[in-house]
Amino acid sequence: MPRRLIDELKILSVWTFTLALTGCIGTAGIAPRSDALSADALATDAAIQTAAQDAQWPQSQWWRAYGDRQLDDWVNLALLGSPSMAIAAARVRQAKALAGVAESAESLHIDASAALKRHNWPADPFYGPGDLSGQTTWDNNAGLGFTYALDLWGRERSASEQALDLAHMSAAQARQAQLELVNNVVQVYIQLSLHYAQRDIVQRTLAQQEQILELAQRRLHGGLGTHLEVSQAEALLPETHRQVDALDEQIALAQNQLAALAGKGPGQGSQLQRPSLSLQAPLGLPSTLPAQLLGQRPDVVASRWAVAANARGIEVAHAGFYPNVDLVGSLSYLATGGGMLEFLAGRKLAYNVGPALSLPIFDGGRLRAQLSDASAGYDLAVARYNQTLVEALRQISDQLIRRASMDKQQAFADESVAAAQHSYDIALIAYQRGLTGYLEVLNAQTLLLRQQQVEQQVQAARLAVHAQLVTALGGGLGAGADAPDAERLHAPKPLAVIDR
């Protein structure tokens, strides 16, 4: 419909209902109370400012930085077969379908109807149907009806935009689900690698304990040792065997967890080989972090779409306070008597066309409640967006702090293992030569075992921090290609309604 005609109808509707509006329902000053934060307005700490000097966003397949082909295969397997991804994809399709339903309200609607009925007319000399009295005839009709919403106040347009914003939000949530799934797979895979490394340490410890037992037995037979030393050496073996068995259990459980994340049965997980993770290239950070964060984290993008959708919801609620004008019409054929299909000959043609107007006068507070609900929904969406933004910056700062700490801890752990290994070697040689007792060897071995375990835990934590930092940065998914601009986040200003 021409824009000029729509403008004229707006003017006509306003003048037509000027008197009615004096008693019309008013908005009573109902409006949102919150504003979305700007990422650049949030202060960043030294960790972010330091890391932002020489870095870039992570790649979309960031897990390849670990250099493990098996991990690559399992991430791809999870992305294809995980039930969580299937659920996210179904929600996106559902949201798109609902957007299509809302958009259809802006289009011309045409409906067809037809009825073929045998009608027995009453034989009543006073109130009967005249010549048809006492007869049975065909009483048929067929028609086309159409309606077109002129949408003078943008109700239908805002509703379809709101549904489309919600579809965008679902798509961003699907990307967030993908990011979380990949992070979970990587984290479990790192734990699997840690369990294997810890098992190696315990196995080496077991071999050392068996060597010490053999040495204690030789010393006893040679008259240099005691039965107490042999008994002490034997007492450690069952506990070490238990630790090996416990780590075998942890390995099997991690394999089952990976299989479940990929949507597979436990048998698939049992086929996993030992991980071979390595991480040489450090991950940096973009210099424009706060601003670009808005477009890179899927959860931030989803929160922005939620704010935009709720802003459109306020527009829909506002439009309910104003006259609604629809263009309606019908074209029908009808006939009583004659053959079954004679009414289609067109001799009984009827039609009507014209505007249909409606205006709320009194509704018991329904429209005000709807506007209040929409305004509160907008405030809630804004608060969630602000919370998501603040939490995103906190997570990035946390992981940067942890990464710097893990680098230092790795160096200290390596030094501790080297020192503990040296102490153990000295204690073992001294024990072999009869210069020290078994207690010194046991203490040195216990220290070495503890430091080796700490070293492996630090290495695993360093790998995990990399994955957490990438996840905090948005995982390189490019969510910014589908983010609403800042203008769409603002709550709409209410149209002029006379409040009484």
Image (tube, rainbow, N blue to C red):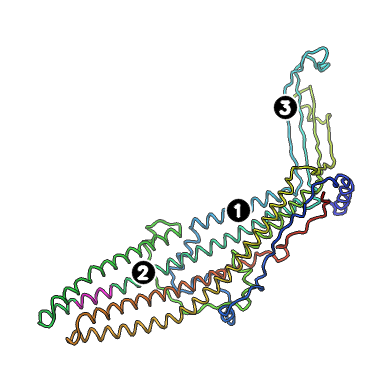
Instruction: Check disc 1 and give the amino acid type.
Output: Arg
Decide which of tag 2 and tag 1 comes sooner along the chain: 1
Q: Is residue 450 above or below residue 184?
A: below
Quarter of the view holding residue 236: bottom left
Q: Position of residue 278 (x, y in %)?
A: 43, 76
Which residue is denoted by mark 3 in the rendering?
A: 116
- The answer to whether the residues at label 2 and label 1 have Cβ atoms under 8 Å apart is no
Q: Is residue 437 above or below residue 179?
A: below
Which is the main secondary structure of the residues drawn in magenta?
A: helix
Q: Position of residue 231 (x, y in %)?
A: 16, 73
Instruction: Check disc 3 and give the amino acid type.
Output: Leu
- Tag 1's secondary structure? helix
Residue 448 left/right relative to 4: left
For marks 2 and 1, give the CA distance: 40 Å
Closer to us: 203 or 222: 222
Tag nearer the camera, 2 or 1: 2
Which residue is denoted by mark 2 in the rendering?
A: 195
- Tag 2's secondary structure? helix
Closer to us: 102 or 385: 385
Q: Position of residue 84 (x, y in %)?
A: 51, 57
Residue 276 left/right relative to 85: left
Start-end of magenta stretch: 203-212
Closer to us: 56 or 457: 457
Tag nearer the camera, 2 or 3: 2
Instruction: Check disc 2 and give the amino acid type.
Output: His
Which residue is denoted by mark 1 in the rendering?
A: 93
Decide which of tag 3 and tag 1 comes sooner along the chain: 1
